[in-house]
Amino acid sequence: MRVLVTGASGTIGTALCDALFARGDDVVGLSRDPGRARSSNPRLTWHRWEPTLERPDPAAFEGVDGVVNLVGEPIDQRWNDEVKQRILESRRQATHNLVQTIEALDELRRPKVLISQSAIGYYGDRGDEELDEGSAPGSGFVSEVPQAWEQAAHELDNAGVRVVVVRTGLVLDAQSGLLKEMLTPFKLGVGGPLAGGRMYFSWIHLEDEIGIMLWALDSEQASGTFNATAPEPVTNKEFSKALGRAVKRPAITPVPGFVLDLKFGSEFGQVLRGGQRVFPKRTQELGYGFKHPRLDEALVDLV
């Protein structure tokens, strides 16, 4: 296949491009600075795009069979009104602009499938309620962003393109994200639960995150919404114990909630105190087989 990827230089995007190349696909990337992107990953064919300001160049879609949309401002930062607006528009407006270009292409030149990233924040903070793809959305900013993101992707529903929305959970990767942040204190034996540890972590190994996207690209039956979370969501306390076992250290030093506030500010710190207990019901029903369904094995594999 020839696959166009937005957000190709991020953690998930880089891993996805590597997997596509490994199986013999061609990859096209969109970047604000194609020259810089080309120097860091010369295997991709790069095109310039300012995601929130313009539609991508139709020339970038020449011969493209599928599009994977991973564009979006990082959320793990201190929030204020300006940052929250960037987080929202880097998903909603950027996806709208992407869809506008695809829709305007001649029908024979349109990609067959759009895989568009979303997040399980869609469900809001729901405590220990069991959630799947059919569950109702939550409320608040952390839920409103994925809802708007998904609505922009679904603007393509009537254009003869198969639209897949992937609601991603906590992606586990030793080189990035929350797991990277946690590894140093846990290896030193001073790790433990965050803010009491009662909130649920609906996690997924990076390899399965990529696996679901490849499966969705290739599977004609994959359409609509899929949760990209392992079948075994756990509380933060359970996660901490499992990580302690993986690095062979005790995990008994709790991290007070105010530490999250100091690092990320009170608003995002409060978001991190919440969680979702999410299950990949449709993902499994339609045939995706998880490579890392159990947390203990996944963490040992990663660390």
Image (cartoon, rainbow, N blue to C red):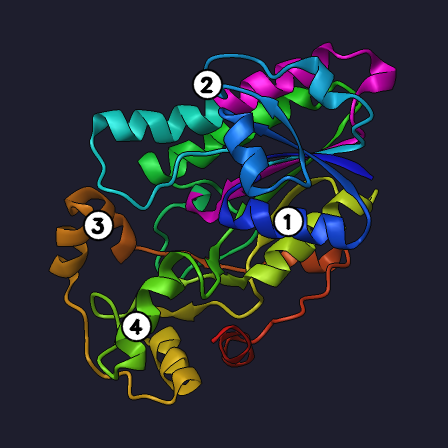
- Given the image, on which type of amino acid does mark 2 rest? Thr
- Which residue is disc 4 drawn over? 184
Residue displayed at 80% across by 53% down: 23
- Which residue is disc 2 drawn over? 52
Could you classify mark 2 by the number of other residues whose Cα lies within 10 Å: few (under 14), some (14-19), or many (20 or more)?
some
Assign a secondary structure to mark 4. Answer: helix
Magenta stretch?
A: 93-121
- Given the image, on which type of amino acid does mark 1 rest? Leu
Tell me the quadrant of the picture where the N terminus can be found.
Answer: top right
Could you classify mark 4 by the number of other residues whose Cα lies within 10 Å: few (under 14), some (14-19), or many (20 or more)?
few
- Given the image, on which type of amino acid does mark 4 rest? Thr
Front of the two marks 2 and 4: 4
Q: In this orientation, which residue lies closer to the viewer: 59 or 92? A: 59
- Which residue is disc 3 drawn over? 270
First in sequence, mark 1 or 2: give its number: 1
Residue 282 appears anywhere in the view: no
